[in-house]
Image (spheres, rainbow, N blue to C red):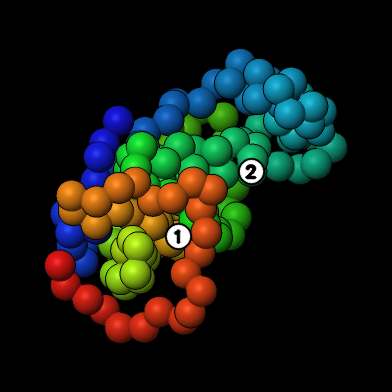
């Protein structure tokens, strides 16, 4: 697990891309069973194509959400904290696709006890089609400082300005 700090992070940094797949029917079925989502568009191809008129089995939105959180949590490390994440499902991903979670540092702000890093993020497929754009805020410890406190308590005041470390 990574031990990233606020000072190690620069504007424009890219987190390591997380690749998942190609996703199979078995992946979708296992995920559907785990979360008890029995909508047929995730496992019954005949229903999906003939009844719903969709191009194929759809990757569950919650599975894509989990991929995003996995990538961000890995990047934040054991001393950081994933504070805020938002994204939109803009297009479908289908069984057979490989998905790639990416994120780029777009801002940095310092609070009294830790730094906050803004990220632009998303999920692309093999054709580089963006399906799930979003943003995140990650709390990272300062260099040579303790981990971000648990439970995480957000800064009390509004933070402003981009800082360098």
In the image, residue 110 above or below residue 143: below
Residue 105, disc: none
Q: Which mark is residue 136?
A: 1
Position above or below: 112 against 98: below
Mark with earlier residue (1, 2): 2
Left or right relative to 87: residue 100: left
Q: Please say whether residue 144 is visible from this viewpoint.
A: yes
Indicate the quadrant containing the N terminus: top left, top right, bottom left or bottom right.
top left
The answer to which image quadrant residue 105 occupies is: bottom left
- Taking the spot 22% from the left edge, 76% from the top edge, the residue there is 163
The structure residue drawn at horizontal position 49% and vertical position 46%, both measured from the top left corner, is 150
Separation of disc 1 and disc 2 at Cα? 17 Å
Can residue 46 be seen in the rendering of this structure?
A: no
In the picture, the quarter occupied by the C terminus is: bottom left
- Residue 86 position by quadrant: bottom right
**CB contact under 8 Å: marks 1 and 2:** no
Q: Mark 2 packing: few (<14 Cα in 10 Å), some, or many (20+)? A: some
- Percent position of residue 46, x then y: 77, 26
| Residue indicated by mark 2 | 61
Tell whether 94 sits left or right of 78: right
* Residue at the far right in the pictured view: 51
């Amino acid at each position: 697990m990574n031990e990233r700090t606020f000072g190690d992070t620069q504007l424009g940094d890219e987190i390591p891309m997380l690749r998942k797949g190609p996703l199979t029917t078995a992946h979708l079925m296992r995920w559907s069973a785990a979360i008890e989502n029995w909508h047929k568009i995730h496992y019954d191809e005949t229903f999906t194509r003939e009844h719903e008129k969709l191009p194929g089995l759809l990757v569950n939105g919650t599975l894509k959400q989990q991929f995003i959180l996995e990538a961000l949590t890995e990047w934040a490390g054991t001393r950081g904290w994933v504070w805020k994440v938002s994204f939109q499902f803009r297009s479908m991903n289908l069984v057979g696709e490989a998905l790639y979670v990416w994120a780029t540092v777009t801002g940095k702000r310092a609070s009294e006890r830790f730094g906050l890093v803004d990220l632009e993020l998303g999920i692309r497929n093999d054709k580089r089609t963006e399906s799930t754009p979003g943003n995140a805020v990650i709390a990272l410890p300062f260099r040579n400082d303790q981990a971000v406190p648990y439970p995480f308590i957000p800064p009390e005041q509004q933070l402003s300005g981009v800082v360098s470390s």
